[in-house]
C-alpha cells in the first residue's frame, strides 16, 4: 500500500476532478483540504455526501471549486458558511442543489454500476425544476399512474476522507461512518488520511473487519494526526468549537478568510 | 415555576408526538430535539428518538442513507422541518430569497426535506420567528411542497406549524393553516399583523397550555443534559 505524505496526496487529486466528500461529522479530511488549497487546486467538482460545511467553504473561498453539488452547506451551530453564500450570490460557482437522500441514492447507483436509482419525493419542488439531469418517469411496476424521480448514478473520480485507523496493507477502519464505505465503493480512486497506522491486519480482526474498507478500494493513505481539525472525529477528537467559531466569523469576508487560511495553514500545531 | 418561552415550545411540540413510535430529529433542531426527548420520557420509552449528528442519541448505524430508507418504508412517524420562508400552503424554502440560483439571501440548502416531507406522516414545522419575513404568502423557492396532486405517492406531509406566537394545524384537504392555540401573552390581532399568509380560525382557539412543575423539572434536568450532546451551545 502506498503510504504517502498529505502533500503528495493532494498533488494526486487533479484539477477538475469530481471529488466526493463526507458531512462534517464523518471524517472530513481537512489537513488534505489545506494541502489542496496550498497547491492551488482548481475547478474541482465537489459532491457532498450529502452535505458539507467548513471543508466546502474553505475550498470555495480559496477558489478551488467550479461545481458544488450538495443538499446543504452549513457551519451548523456556528452559522452560515460565508464563502459558500458569497460565491452563490456572485455566481462564481455552479450550484447543483439537491436533497440528502438523492445524493446518497445516486452514489448507491454508482456503487452498483447501474445508470440510475428511483426515489420518492422531489416532485413539485423547485429542486427538481433546476435539475434537468433528474428525470420523472411513470413507475413501470405500477398498475395506475405513479410518477417517480430517477437520479443519475454518481461516480466520483475521487473519494476523499479521514478515518481513525489504517493498517500497513491499506485497509481503513471507519467505525460507524458507513457513508465512507459507499463513497469508496463508488469512486474510481479513494484517498484517505488517518490518525494512526497499525501493524495489525484490520481484515483479520473480527471486530474491526465489518467496519473496514478493504485495501482493494483504497488508492493511497497519508497519516495526518488531528487531520479533521478544527472539526472533530468520533471517538478520537472533540471539535475545536473556539476555532470553528473563529472560522465562521472569518468566512464572512474575503480578507478575514485569507488571514484565517494563512494562520492555520499548518494545522492544529502550526 | 416560571415557564420560559422555549420551554413552552418544547412542551407544545412534545404533546404532538404522542403515540409516535419513532421520532427523528435533524440538524439545527434543539427545540424539537428536546421535545422528542421529553415525549420519550413521558411515554416511558415507547417513543424511540433518533437525533442525527448525536452520539448518545443515535439509534442508527448504517450511514447517511439509513434514516431515509426507514422513512421510505414508513417507519419514521414524525420529523421536524423549518424554513427561511414558510407559506400559507405549507411550502417550505430552505434555499434563498430572490431569483435562483443567484439569490440575494442564500441559506444552507434543502437537506432531507424534499424527501422526508413527502414520506413522514407527521411533519411538524417549527419556526420560532413569527414575522412577515418568515411566514409569507408564497415562498421564493420550493424546497419541498406542502401538498401534492393525488397521483403523487405521498403518505406524509405537514401536520402543524409551531411558532413563537401560536400553533397552526394544517388542513391537507384545503391546503390551509388553521390557528388553534395562542401562546400566553400573545393576541390574535398581533398574529394577523405578523403573518404573511391568510389562515383559518379554529372554532375554539385556546391559550397554549403550560407545562406543570414536574415537566419543567424534567426538562431542566435530564433532558437538558441529553440535548447537550448534539447541541452543546443550546444547552448552555
Image (cartoon, helix red, strand yellow):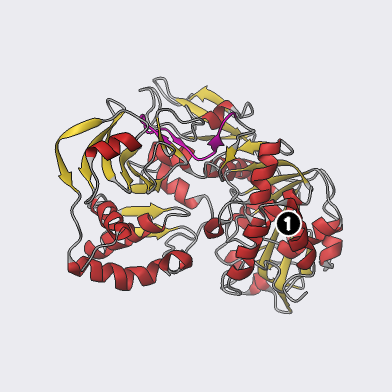
Q: Is residue B95 inside the magenta stretch?
A: yes
Spot occupied by residue B159 in the image (x, y as percentages of width and height): 30, 40
Where, by quadrant of the figure, is residue A31 drawn? bottom right
Q: Is residue B44 inside the magenta stretch?
A: no
Residue at the image point whose x is 43% and y is 31% from the top: B145
Please name the residue that numbered disc 1 is placed on.
A257
| Quadrant for the C terminus of chain B in the image | bottom left
Closest to the observer, B122 or B189: B189
Residue at the image point whose x is 61% and y is 74% from the top: A237
| Residue farthest along the bottom direction in this orientation | A199
Query: Dot 1 lies on which element?
Result: helix
Magenta residues?
Answer: B86-99
* Left or right placement of residue A136 versus residue A243 in this view: left
Q: Is residue A137 above or below residue A104?
A: above
* Left or right placement of residue B182 versus residue A4 in this view: left
Residue at the image point whose x is 52% and y is 41% from the top: B110
Q: Is residue B40 above or below residue A133?
A: below
Is residue B76 in view? no
Where, by quadrant of the figure, is residue B97 drawn? top right
Crowdedness of circle 1 by 10 Å Cα count: few (<14), some, many (20+)? many
Spot occupied by residue B15 in the image (x, y as percentages of width and height): 23, 53
Is residue A197 in view? yes
The residue marked by circle 1 belongs to what chain?
A
Amino acid at each position: 500500500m502506498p503510504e504517502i505524505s498529505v502533500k503528495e496526496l493532494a498533488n494526486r487529486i487533479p484539477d477538475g476532478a469530481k471529488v466526493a466528500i463526507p458531512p462534517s461529522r464523518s471524517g472530513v479530511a481537512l489537513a488534505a483540504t489545506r494541502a489542496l488549497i496550498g497547491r492551488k487546486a482548481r475547478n474541482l467538482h465537489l459532491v457532498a455526501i450529502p452535505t458539507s460545511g467548513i471543508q466546502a467553504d474553505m475550498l470555495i473561498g480559496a477558489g478551488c471549486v467550479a461545481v458544488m453539488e450538495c443538499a446543504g452547506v452549513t457551519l451548523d451551530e456556528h452559522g452560515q458558511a460565508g464563502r459558500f453564500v458569497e460565491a452563490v450570490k456572485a455566481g462564481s460557482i455552479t450550484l447543483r442543489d439537491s436533497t440528502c437522500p438523492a445524493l446518497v441514492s445516486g452514489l448507491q447507483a454508482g456503487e452498483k454500476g447501474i445508470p440510475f436509482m428511483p426515489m420518492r419525493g422531489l416532485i413539485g419542488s423547485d429542486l427538481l425544476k433546476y435539475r434537468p439531469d433528474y428525470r420523472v418517469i411513470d413507475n413501470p411496476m405500477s398498475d395506475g399512474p405513479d410518477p417517480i424521480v430517477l437520479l443519475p448514478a454518481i461516480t466520483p473520480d475521487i473519494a476523499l476522507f479521514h478515518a481513525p485507523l489504517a493498517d500497513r496493507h491499506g485497509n481503513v477502519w471507519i467505525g460507524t461512518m458507513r457513508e465512507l464505505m459507499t463513497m469508496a465503493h463508488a469512486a474510481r480512486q479513494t484517498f484517505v488520511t488517518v490518525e494512526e497506522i497499525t501493524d495489525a491486519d484490520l481484515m483479520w480482526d473480527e471486530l474491526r473487519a465489518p467496519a473496514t474498507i478493504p485495501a482493494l478500494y483504497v488508492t493511497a493513505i497519508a497519516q495526518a494526526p488531528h487531520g479533521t481539525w478544527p472539526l472533530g472525529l468520533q471517538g478520537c477528537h472533540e471539535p475545536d468549537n473556539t476555532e470553528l467559531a473563529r472560522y465562521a466569523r472569518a468566512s464572512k469576508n474575503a480578507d478575514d478568510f485569507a488571514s484565517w487560511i494563512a494562520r492555520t495553514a499548518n494545522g492544529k500545531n502550526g | 415555576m416560571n415557564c420560559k418561552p422555549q420551554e413552552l415550545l418544547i412542551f407544545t411540540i412534545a404533546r404532538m408526538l404522542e403515540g409516535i413510535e419513532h421520532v427523528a430529529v435533524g440538524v439545527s433542531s434543539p427545540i424539537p430535539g428536546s421535545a422528542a426527548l421529553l415525549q420519550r420520557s413521558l411515554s416511558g420509552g415507547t417513543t424511540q428518538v433518533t437525533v442525527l449528528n448525536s452520539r448518545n442519541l443515535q439509534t442508527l448505524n448504517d450511514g447517511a442513507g439509513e434514516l431515509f430508507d426507514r422513512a421510505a418504508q414508513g417507519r419514521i412517524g414524525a420529523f421536524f422541518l423549518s424554513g427561511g420562508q414558510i407559506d400559507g400552503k405549507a411550502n417550505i424554502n430552505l434555499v434563498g430569497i430572490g431569483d435562483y440560483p443567484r439569490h440575494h439571501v442564500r441559506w444552507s440548502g434543502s437537506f432531507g426535506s424534499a424527501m422526508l416531507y413527502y414520506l413522514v406522516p407527521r411533519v411538524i414545522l417549527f419556526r420560532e420567528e413569527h414575522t412577515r419575513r418568515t411566514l409569507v404568502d408564497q415562498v421564493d423557492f420550493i424546497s419541498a411542497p406542502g401538498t401534492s396532486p393525488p397521483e403523487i405517492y405521498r403518505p406524509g406531509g405537514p401536520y402543524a406549524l409551531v411558532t413563537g406566537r401560536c400553533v397552526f394545524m394544517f388542513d391537507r384537504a384545503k391546503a390551509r393553516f388553521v390557528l388553534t392555540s395562542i401562546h400566553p401573552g400573545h393576541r390574535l390581532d398581533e398574529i394577523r399583523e405578523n403573518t404573511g399568509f391568510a389562515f383559518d380560525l379554529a372554532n375554539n382557539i385556546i391559550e397554549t397550555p403550560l407545562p406543570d412543575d414536574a415537566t419543567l423539572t424534567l426538562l431542566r434536568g435530564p433532558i437538558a443534559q441529553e440535548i447537550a450532546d448534539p447541541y452543546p451551545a443550546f444547552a448552555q
